[in-house]
Amino acid sequence: MYNTAMAHTPDWHILDNNFPDANAGIAVPQRVTSAEGATLEIANLDRTDPPGYSSGGVPRGASFNRNVFRFGPDPCMPAIPVVSQVSGFDPASVPIQWRLIARHVLCRHMNTGGYRYRASSEILQREWRGESRAPSFTIFGSDDRQCRCTYNDQSRVLGGHAILMIAAQVNSSTLLDYVHLRIGGTNPSVENVYRYLDSQLTGYDGNVTAMLRAIYAHESGFQQFAGRVQTQAAMTFNKRFHSDPGQPDCRVIFDWPDDPENFPLASFDFGLGISQFTKVGQQKVSEEIAWDWRENIRMSANLFLRKLRAKSQPGLTWQHWAMDAWAAYNGSGAAAELYAKQLSMSPEGSRIPLTPVAGVTEIALISPPPELAPPAGWVVA
């Protein structure tokens, strides 16, 4: 029989369910599609609001309007065709400026220690700006010479809810129209992940690559994005998680503001993407970690390489070195040791030999991509 003197109920594990930024969406501008005898309007995209949308909020429903896009497994922003209805001015001399803002408000529960969790939100946002000297153009179109991007490039990705604005300054008036978009992601193939990882680890011993491959296969099955709506998750905290041996198992339901399908795979405790890179303590998550599988791999690989470097000592075998670093990567205690054991028995982990590590193995970190330039101007103040 359980000793209930120290027992707690399952809801003890959740400190709060308040997500204050859950509906902190993008502020929509005021439409002005005609003035001073001139007109500007987006003609080819759905100009209706998403179902149930409230201005400035976050549309989380499974249904949207017709403007649903996905970037590919490369990853790369999707080509977005824009056909403008224009009269009263010539875009060749008065260019159409465009601005695309994408925002994803990601909500999950963050581990505060002792298997207790607090609701937490991350506002992930990026924008692109450019102009076109033709009424029809393609944003992120590689062969569209009439449209140029003055900030960012199509290799820097972010999805979520997006507002696409077009504007033109005609005489003393500013014409402006906008549409709502939803942008999702596409999972890479395992081969693409391995190819990227191998390219970043040129010169490393193959055993180091195998250690990282084992992590990615175990964590998410190489999924950066979920092919389903993410609404809640159940977690059972058993005796491994409780210091009191008389504590009954706790089955806890973690519920959060929904994410639509093809949004980043995120665990109940804020683990993201292929590596399940986790927001915990001072370790933050970013737009790239959530939406760009390459950066998710780079950041998690560097985290593991730091652990591997710290665990280096004379006389280690490759397998023991891997076990020590895997456990440190996962945390500490019995759960971390179990994690390392599971990886050692995986197809990639079992390839790592018991032979001694010969000589000095260089453990350098993978360099980040270059910084983005600041955004260019925008016709609307």
Image (cartoon, rainbow, N blue to C red):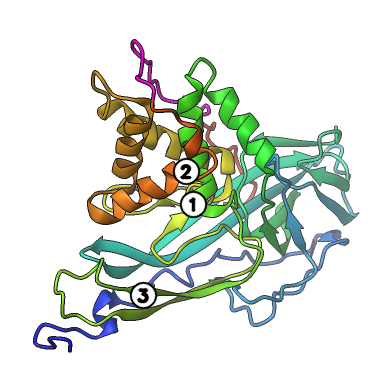
Q: What SS does tag 2 mark?
A: helix
Question: Mark 2 and mark 3: span between their CA atoms?
Answer: 23 Å
Task: Determine which quarter of the picture holds residue 200.
Answer: top right
Furthest residue in direction top, as rendered:
359
Residue positioned 61% across, 71% down in the render: 229
Query: Which residue is denoted by mark 1 in the rendering?
Result: 219
Residue 148: percent from left, percent from top: 75, 35
Q: Callout 2 environment at 10 Å: few (<14), some (14 to 19), or many (20+)?
A: many
Q: Quadrant of the N terminus?
A: bottom left
- Residue 344, percent from left and from top: 42, 42
Closer to us: 194 or 92: 194
Q: Residues within 10 Å of mark 3 (few under 14, many from 20)?
A: few
Relative vertical location of residue 35 with respect to residue 223 in this rendering, above or below? below
Question: CB of mark 1 within 8 Å of CB of mark 2?
Answer: yes
Q: Residue at x 64, y 59 (%)?
A: 162
Q: Which residue appears at 70% of the width and 41% of the height?
A: 76
Side of 241 relative to 222 (left or right): left
Q: Which secondary structure lies at badge 1? A: helix
Q: Marks 3 and 1, Cα distance to the nearest angstrom?
A: 18 Å
Mark 1 packing: few (<14 Cα in 10 Å), some, or many (20+)? some
Helix, strand or loop at label 3? It is strand
- Front in this rendered view, residue 115 or 161: 115
- Residue that carries the numbered disc 2 in the rendered image: 215
Amino acid under disc 1 = Glu
Q: How many marks?
A: 3
Disc 3 residue type? Thr
Please name the residue shown 66% across and 51% down the image.
100
- Please name the amino acid that badge 2 sits on: Ile
In magenta, the rendered stretch is 355-371
